[in-house]
Image (cartoon, grey):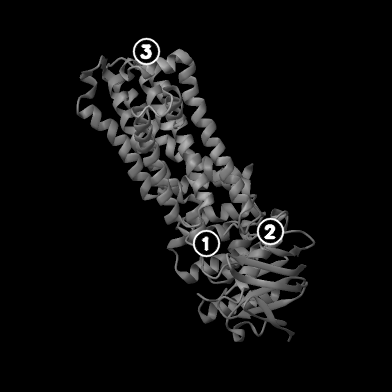
Amino acid sequence: MKNLFLIAYLDLKESIRARWFLIYSFVFGGLIALFFIAGITESQVMGFSGLSRLLLMYIQVTIIILPIFILITTVRSISGDRDSHILEYMLSFPISLAEYYWGKMVGRFITVFLPVFLAMVIAIIYGSVMGVAIPWAIFFLYSGLLFALSMVFLGIAFFISSIVKSSEMALGISFFVWIFALAFIDIALISFMLQNRFNEELIIAVALINPMEIFRVAAISLFDPELTVMGPVAFYILDTISQPIFVLISIVYPIGLGTLFAYFGYKVFSKKDLV
Amino acid sequence: MIKINNLTKKFGKTVSLNGVSIEFNKNDAIALMGANGAGKTTLIRLILGYYHANSGSVSVNGMNPIKNRQKILQHVSFVPQLPPPIKLSLKELMDYVCSSSDIVRDDIFHYAKEMEFELHPNLNKSFFKLSGGMKQKMLIAISLAKKSDILIYDEPTANLDPKARDNFYRLLKTDEQDKLALFVTHRIEEVKEIVNREIYMDLGSIVSDKNV
C-alpha cells in the first residue's frame, strides 16, 4: 500500500510538471473566467440564470472536451512507459504490478479530476463574492457527475493503455472511443429509431448505456426534473425510474463501469508480457 | 542461482529464444554476447519476469520470476542499455528505489561519488535532462547501492567515458564476491578483466559457453 501511494504521488508530481497539465488546467479555469467575462451569469436562457446558467454552460462544454482530454493524456500512461522503456526499468524493482498499476491510476485520477473540480469551486467562490445566489444542489450534483465521468474515461483509458503495445495505436483507439460515445452511437440509434427497426425502449436503454449520454441527461435533470426539453424520451426514463434514482444511477453506473474497465486493464497488464 | 530449462520465447512467428537450457551460479561473472537479435535481451527479460515463456522454465533462487517477481527482484540489480527518459527528479527517483527496495539513500550517494557523479547539486533535476553518462552513472550507483546477489547489466558502459568505465569495473571487482554478475556486451575486451565465463548466443540459441 505504501508503494501504491508513492507511485500515485510521483505520478501526480510528474503530471503537474507536464505541459499538458498546464494546458488542461488553463482550458477549464479559462472556461470559467471566460463565462464570467462574457456575462453568462447575467443572462437567462430557458429559465436558467446566474451561477446555474454558468454551471450549465460549463457542464455542456465539459462533456465534450473532458473525455478526450482524459483519454489522450492518460492512454499513454502505461503504453508510453512501455514504448520508452521506463516500464522496463521501474519494474525491475520489487514493486507489485498491482501497486504500480493502481498507483498510476490514483495519481492520474487526481490529476484529471482536480482542475475540473477546482474550476467549479472558483466559480462558486467568485459568484459568492459577487453576491450571486449559490446553487449548491447543482454544484454537488455536477461534482458527482464530473467525478463519475472522469472515472469512466480514466478506466477506459487504462484499459486501452494495457491492451495496446504502442502509444500511437492507443491514441487512435481513444479518439475512436471518444467520437463513438460522443456522436456515432447517437447517430446510429437515431437512424434505427427512424426506420422503426427496434423497439424505442430498447434504443433508449442502449443510448443510456453510453456514459456520456447518461451524464448529459442527468445534467439536464436537475434543472428540468421532468426532462421536458428531451420530449417524449423523458417518459421512457422517468416512467421507469424516478428522477432521484436516475441521478444516483448516473453517478454510480459510470464509476462502476470505469472501475470494471480499469480492473480488466489490470488483468491484461498483469497477464501479458510487461515490455 | 538461475536455472533455465528448455526455454522458448516467440513473438508471433519469430522465435527469439529456441529451447535454451543453461545455469548461472554464484560467483559467475558472465559476458553474454551475440549479434543483434541473438536473444540476449529476451533471455534477460525472461529472468526479470517481464515475459511469459512459450515453453520451458526459468527459476531464480528456486522461484518462478513471474509468480514471485517481488521476492526475486529484491535480489536483482538491473541497468538497461539505454537509460530510459524518466521524468522524475533524481530525488524522486531515489524515493522510488529506496521505498521499493530498502536501499539506503546514503549508499546511493556513496556509489555516485565513487563514480565521480555529483549527486547533491543535481537532486532536483529531471533524470531525463541529465547527460547520457550522468544517467548511466546514476543507474549504476543505484544498482550497486541495492547490494543485490544478482547483477544484470545490459551494455552498462555504452555511455561512459574511459575513466568512468574504470571506476565502474573497480567498484564491481571490490563488490562481486558471492554474487552472480551478468554483462550483456558486444565488446569482450571491455569486460575481459572481470568475467570468468563467456557465453555466445546466435539466433535464439547458446552456441558457446566457456569458462575463462
Disc 1: host chain: A
Q: Circle 2 marks a residue in which chain?
A: B
Q: Which is in the foreground here, disc 1 or disc 3?
A: 3
Which is more toward the observer, B170 or A157? A157
Position of A39 relative to B14 (above/below): above
Q: Is residue A6 visible?
A: no
Q: Secondary structure at mark 1?
A: loop
Q: Residues within 10 Å of mark 2 (few under 14, many from 20)?
A: many
**Would you name the residue on which mark 3 appears?**
A226
Report the side of B95 relative to B193 (left or right): left
**Mark 1 = which residue?**
A85
Mark 3: amino acid: Glu
Q: Are marks 1 and 3 on the same chain?
A: yes
Residue under mark 3: which chain is it in? A
Q: Residue at x 34, y 23 (%)?
A: A124
Question: Which amino acid type is shown beneath numbered disc 2?
Answer: Leu
From what the image shows, is residue A264 above or below residue A231?
A: below
Decide: is A52 above or below B69.
Answer: above
Q: Residue at x 75, y 73 (%)?
A: B21
In the rendered structure, the answer to whether residue B87 lies left or right of residue A27 reads right
- Residue at point 50% right, 79% down? B161
Q: Position of residue A178 (x, y in %)?
A: 39, 41
Marks 2 and 1: same chain? Answer: no
What is the C-alpha distance between the residues marked 2 and 1?
17 Å
List x then y, in percent, for residue B172: 66, 74
Q: Going from the N terminus, do you reach mark 1 or mark 3 first? A: 1
Within 10 Å of the Cα at label 1, are there few (<14), some (14-19), or many (20+) other Cα atoms?
some
Q: Are marks 1 and 3 in contact (CB under 8 Å)?
A: no
Q: Give residue A59's mark.
A: none
Q: For the residue marked with disc 1, what is the amino acid? A: His
Q: Which residue is mark 2?
A: B73
